[in-house]
Amino acid sequence: MKKLIKLLFLNVLLISPIFAKDVADTLVELQNNINIVWTATAAFLVFFMQAGFALVESGFTRAKNTVNIMMKNLMDFSIGTVFFYFIGFGLMFGATNGFMGTTNFAISGKTLNDADWIWIFLFFQTVFAGTAATIVSGAIAERTKFSGYLIYSVFICAFIYPIFGSWAWGGLLDGGGWLEKLGFLDFAGSTVVHSIGGWLALAGAIILGPRIGKFGRDGKDKAIPGHNIALAALGVFILWFGWFGFNSGSTTLGNGNIGRIAVITNMSAAGGAIAAMFTAWFVIGKPDGSMALNGTLAGLVGITAGCDVVSPAGALMIGLMSGVLVVFSVLFIDKKLKIDDPVGAVSVHGVCGAFGTLAVGFFALDNGLLYGGGGRQLLIQTIGVVVAFIWAFGLGLVLFYIVKITIGLRVSKDEELRGLDIGEHGMEAYDGFQIFTTQ
Amino acid sequence: MKLVIAYIQPERLPEVKQALYAREIFKISVTNAMGCGRQKGYHETYRGADIEVNLLKKVRIEIAVNESFVQPTIDGIIEGSKTGQIGDGKIFVLPIEECIRIRTGETGHDAIG
């Protein structure tokens, strides 16, 4: 009976043209609110990735530097939030002059009522900028002066990340960059977020030089084991969890795509973990836990660019290849290039970010090379990847070098040996515990 | 048979091990230790309040050696741990009454081996 009344009521609504218009308006408003709620949820998930990064980095490094790692992760996000709001957001999403955005600083000129989309868009983009900034922390861990790191945090969130972002993503709001006009596909940021962070990390690690004791007098690399693999694993699980917001949230639409992209993202992460474990098993001799954890992140970074345009099978392939790639990349950077990256950030974010972006050219269902779409998309992807490398690595070298010759980038030898927790922050992470500070 | 005990700065341990290896002294026991000597300790703060850190982190090394290895052991520890700063540490040399290897039951010089 109730149903009947409801049906009759709806019929009356639809018959009457005035009511029908109201219903249509309400539905549009409802969908808009669903979009906002979903994007907010996703943004909160991405924010939680900061916790994941902090745990991964501290777990993979020594106990005597834990306070320093936590402080870097706390401060790069806090500083990033402020500078992205006042400077970065406008450079990234303002009306562009061809090189960068020039309006929308501090979301000025927007209508700004409560129903406005701009609030959650700003927040979503802020947590993305924070992610790019925090990637670098791990690669330059255990030897970087805290004040030098703060300066770096300002520049990545205010300039380096937003200007490149405006080339690829500016059109999401008022901009429109040359890369996206070319047809460059980077759905959630394999290149824009992860490669940019990864290549900056590479520049930082090169300018800093290795930690004391990382390479012997004969130049052979030595292990400096992380102090808590449980923390590192928890961090990776938190990042995996947050990544469902990172990728599924980048639709910014509350519809069925959320589920599809979650399946694809999950598939690639699983593939990355499996492939990295077996690769380590074959190459090193044991299913190394830290490599499998890195492999999970590699799979996630790899699928980030193409998670809306590939099939689950394609995602599995991308994940598996990222997992193999990350192990060889870590070994290559360690043993051949002799660059000290304590947590594998360059391999996970830089190398697998670039690979994932190129993989779109192969695996995209519409225009990928493997699906008969020809090589055009692959060429465009390659341009984006190369430009990202030149931009981030080049500016990174300049930025870190300027910090080095002005306020100094590296702590003293004594401080590094005793630990940055005492030297930089005057406190310990595990007070009351007996901790070996012998290496 | 002598027991050489040394308290050194934790961060000097890798250097000490290298110096001992170079003198063909491979057997070593290492424990974490807290201690203070003439060194005043360092200053920590926690949430704005001062902490006097009197007991410093040290590493205690124990090496049991036969007579001919006593001097090389001492030389190795000094080479690896000496910086010239207060807090470099101390070395104690003690006689050993007896030494038994649990696995084989060997005693004396053979057990120290």
Image: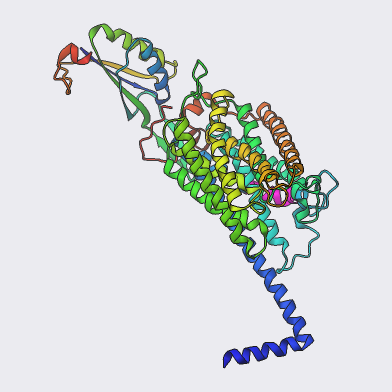
Q: Name the image quarter holding the C terminus of chain A.
A: top left
Position of A245 relative to A330 (above/below): below
The question of residue A82 being in magenta is answered with: yes
Q: Name the image quarter holding the N terminus of chain A.
A: bottom right
Residue A292 at what x, y percent from top left? 48, 40
The question of residue B61 being in magenta is answered with: no
The main secondary structure of the magenta stretch is: helix
Q: Is residue A57 visible?
A: no
User: Left of A185 or right of it: where is B34?
Assistant: left
Q: Quadrant of residue B11?
A: top left
Q: Residue at x 49, y 35 (%)?
A: A279
Q: Residue furthest top?
A: B68
Residue A426 at what x, y percent from top left? 49, 37
Q: Residue furthest right?
A: A97
In this view of the protein, which residue sits in the foreground, A392 or A267? A267
User: Left of A112 or right of it: where is A68?
Assistant: left
Q: Over which residues does the magenta segment extend?
A: A78-89
Q: Quadrant of residue B54?
A: top left
Position of A425 relative to A102 (above/below): above
Residue A385 at what x, y percent from top left? 71, 39
Q: Is residue A27 visible?
A: yes
Residue B78 at what x, y percent from top left? 38, 13
User: Left of A92 or right of it: where is B113?
Assistant: left
Q: Residue at x 75, y 83 (%)?
A: A20
User: Left of A121 or right of it: where is A41?
Assistant: left
Position of A246 relative to A206 (above/below): below
In this view of the protein, which residue sits in the foreground, A246 or B39? A246
Position of A22 relative to B57 (above/below): below
